Amino acid sequence: MPNTYFQFKQFLIDQAADGMKVTTDGCILGALINEVSKGNILDIGTGTGLLSLMLAQRTKAKIHALEIDEKVAHQAVENVKNSPWPDQISVLHQDFKTYETETIYDQIICNPPFFKNSHKGQSKSKNTAIHDDSLSMDSLIKKSKKLLANQGTLWVMYPAYEMDQFAQLATTSGLKLNKQTFVYNQSGGSVFRVIAEFINGQIKKSTSRNLTIKKADGSYTEEFSVLLKDYYLHL
């Protein structure tokens, strides 16, 4: 029977609750985010609390972590409580679409659902986590822009096709695409995920880079190892 937890160097993710599990691409997103050093961060759809905990490891900013599923939110609360940063992260059982706050955020982060009109499994929690009828691109963009400070950043991850759609909508709404990372499972393969930073304000020049997870022999590439060395136990 597989473990119901994922042990990182400084914290543990208990993921026994039904819902989204720790994934390699989720860890890459958490490690790539250029976090703000202070202020307020909003984590939309925190799941087990992975992104919030990864950022808390390296920033003093206050983090509000929203989770729509009550059982999964409770799991995130426990993970935060058992981490070194219980006072830095506030987990809220909230739907982002109806979330009301006077807080203006310096950064918003999200590993959003992206499946459209696809077959759903028996797990309601996992369906919510991965199918976009729970949070559409349009809803994510419009509300994020409303809650972002001037020059605040929005970080998201999508497959390549969906990221193209998201970038078009975001640009139309006034957000500027600042950085993109194209993630490959192996060299020579197709793009697995695209991680992007959008800014609510002005940018100097948009940049892009490639990141490959594994070599041909199945071992991690040096760039992946360097990126995750502060988190993965065996790097």
Image: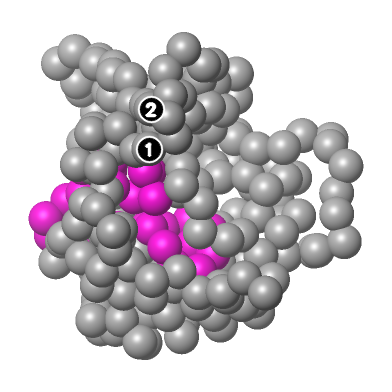
Residue 40 is inside the magenta segment: yes
The structure residue drawn at horizontal position 67% and vertical position 74%, both measured from the top left corner, is 1
Residue 230 can be seen, yes or no = yes
- Badge 2 marks a residue whose secondary structure is loop
The structure residue drawn at horizontal position 33% and vertical position 20%, both measured from the top left corner, is 210
Residue 201 spot, x, y in % from top left: 24, 28
Label 2, on which residue? 215
The structure residue drawn at horizontal position 61% and vertical position 59%, both measured from the top left corner, is 20
Residue 108 can be seen, yes or no = no
- Badge 1 marks a residue whose secondary structure is loop
The structure residue drawn at horizontal position 72% and vertical position 65%, both measured from the top left corner, is 125
- Viewer-closest of 165 and 187: 187
Crowd tier of the residue under label 1, counting other residues whose Cα lies within 10 Å: few below 14, some 14–19, many 20 or above? few
- Viewer-closest of 217 and 225: 217
Residue 177 spot, x, y in % from top left: 34, 21
Residue 128 spot, x, y in % from top left: 71, 56
Crowd tier of the residue under label 2, counting other residues whose Cα lies within 10 Å: few below 14, some 14–19, many 20 or above? few
Question: Most extreme residue toward the front, as rendered?
Answer: 217
Q: Which residue type carries mark 1?
A: Ser
- Viewer-closest of 77 and 6: 6
Labels 1 & 2 near each other (Cβ < 8 A): yes
- The count of marks equals 2
Write down the quadrant of residue 209 in the picture. Answer: top left
Write down the quadrant of residue 116 in the picture. Answer: top right
Decide if residue 210 is on the left or right side of residue 161: left
Please tell me the numbered disc located at residue 219.
1
Residue 144 spot, x, y in % from top left: 44, 44
When the figure is inspected, residue 4 is found, relative to residue 46, above or below; the finding is below
Residue bounds of the magenta highlight: 27-51
Quote the CA–CA distance across marks 1 and 2.
6 Å
Q: Which residue type carries mark 2?
A: Lys
